[in-house]
Amino acid sequence: MGPEAIDRGLAYGDGLFETMRACRGTLPWWPRHRARLLAGAARLGIPMPSDAALDTALADALQASPDGVIKLILTRGAGTRGYAPTPGAAPTLLVTASVAPVAAAPALAVDVLALRLGVQPALAGMKHLNRLEQVLGAREAAERGLDDGLMADADGFLTCSTRANLFARLDGRWITPPVDRAGVAGVARGVLLEAWSPPGGLHVAPLPLDALPRAEALLLSNAVRGILPVGRCGARALDPQPGGFAEARAALAASHPAFRES
């Protein structure tokens, strides 16, 4: 039995990950990814690898895929049987490289998924390894022929899509749902919250399911693809070039050249 068989990341999803876009051998937004990783490790009580170990692993991955996608996984490491962590266990660090994804459709087709996210403030915001809700959601979206699926929490509030943060233009202003009860505090979302100033402003506010039919436009964002417009939600067509969209793209492009055409 190899050491990976008793790694707590594999056994229990006890760990964190970051998925990052590579551009010409660099990692756009690495300080933001690192800050989220550090914050999640502190919350879970997982020791961080040294900066030297991180730098070496990332450099090797970037050499293999200078314009692809880099995935960093940090687990609590090996442990004995049972949920309780083994004191003093050394963390496991894995970094992999893959090719860049194919270009997304000009405007996405989405719909609300039947699956609901659990509400768990202790885990909300982190990019932890427990992604079965997203796995089931992505399967449902694929079976329904959607580009992505919108996910609401158990209390009926829209939170995200299966792989992106959500922005909705509602009643003349842009909002993005909070991620303190469910969902992930996305890196691209963080850039937009700081740098995007659309007409009517950008606000963090709850988005109940019954408000979705009033949404004038929807955008999705993540750190690999940037920001993408939604052209259809269920049977309803939406404006794929809504007011503020160009400014959102410009905000990401100003943050890093990799997102000039995202």
Image: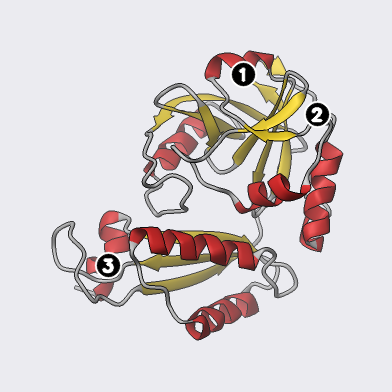
Residue at the spot 82% in from the left edge and 36% down from the top edge: 198
What is the secondary structure assignment of the residue under circle 1? helix
Camera-nearest label, 1 or 3: 1
Q: Earlier in the sequence, mark 2 or mark 1?
A: 2
Q: Residues within 10 Å of mark 1 (few under 14, many from 20)?
A: some
Q: Amino acid at mark 3?
A: Asp
Judge left or right: residue 168 versus residue 75.
right
* Amino acid at circle 2: Gly
Does residue 103 show up? no
- Image coords of residue 83 (percent x, y): 18, 56
Read off the residue under disc 2: 200
* Res. 154 visible in picture: yes
Q: Give the CA separation, mark 1 to mark 3.
A: 42 Å
Residue corresponding to mark 3 = 7
Quarter holding residue 224: bottom right
Q: Residue at x 25, y 58 (%)?
A: 11
In this rendering, the answer to whether 91 lies above or below 117 is below
Where residue 109 sits, quadrant-wise, is top right
Check whether the beta carbons of the residues at disc 1 and disc 3 lie within 8 A of each other: no
Nearer to me, 28 or 3: 28
- Amino acid on which disc 1 is placed: Leu
Q: The N terminus lies in which quarter of the figure?
A: bottom left
Mark 2 or mark 3, which is nearer the start of the sequence?
3
Residue drawn at (27%, 55%), measured in percent from left and top? 12
Compared to residue 66, the image places residue 224 above or below, namely: above
The residue to which callout 1 is attached is: 212
Q: Position of residue 232 (x, y in %)?
A: 69, 23
